[in-house]
Amino acid sequence: MTMPVTLEASARITWRRRLAAHVAVSLARVLMRLSPLRLRRLLMVIRRGAGPCPADRALAARTAVVTVSVQCAGQGCLQRSIATVLLCRFASTWPTWCTGVLTEPFRAHAWVEVDGVPIGERDEIRHFHRTMVIPLMSAPARLGETQ
């Protein structure tokens, strides 16, 4: 039986994981101040050389991030999503990073997903229209060929 990809699947966080999460949250705080274009370009560079991220690893990264940061545990979805992909990248993996909007009422959101499944998000996320998506690079691009 497979476990759903929600926050209830969390496990204890080691001190090393907690330290890495603090570093990721701090870096995300700086990166989220970049313009969308610069943030997109930087994340596209950071993802280079990474492998696919399993859903359980992405959930563990998200759980670690919300454990060490009150802002990320609350309304800080941009910082939370950036910190989550950075923490995954520390382990040489990359989930898909997404931003999107709802038009009525207007709401913007940022999240991480694996194989099209949002990680640790409510079901309402499926109503968001994606505005920016940074997936894992294709295999030829990871090997140094142009994408």
Image (cartoon, rainbow, N blue to C red):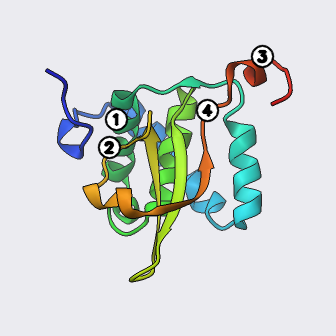
Q: Residues within 10 Å of mark 2 (few under 14, many from 20)?
A: many
Q: Nearer the viewer, mark 3 or mark 1?
A: 3
Disc 4/disc 1 C-alpha distance (Å): 18 Å
Q: Disc 4 or 1, which lies upstream in sequence?
A: 1
Residue 34 position by quadrant = bottom right
- Which tag, 3 or 1, sits closer to the chain's start? 1
Furthest-left residue in this view: 1
Instruction: Specify the amino acid type for callout 4.
Output: Leu
Distance of mark 3 from mark 2, alpha carbons? 31 Å
Q: How crowded is mark 1: few (under 14 residues within 10 Å), some or many (20 or more)?
A: many
Amino acid type at image mark 3? Leu
Badges 2 and 4: C-beta atoms under 8 Å apart?
no
Q: How far apart are marks 2 and 1 (CA)?
A: 5 Å
Q: Is residue 99 above or below residue 93?
A: below
Residue assigned mark 2: 63
Where is residue 98 shown, x and y percent of the image? 53, 52
Q: What element carries label 1?
A: helix
Q: Mark 3 points at which residue?
A: 143
**Residue at mark 4:** 136
Q: Nearer the viewer, mark 3 or mark 2?
A: 3
Element assignment for label 3: loop
Q: Which is in the foreground here, disc 4 or disc 1?
A: 4
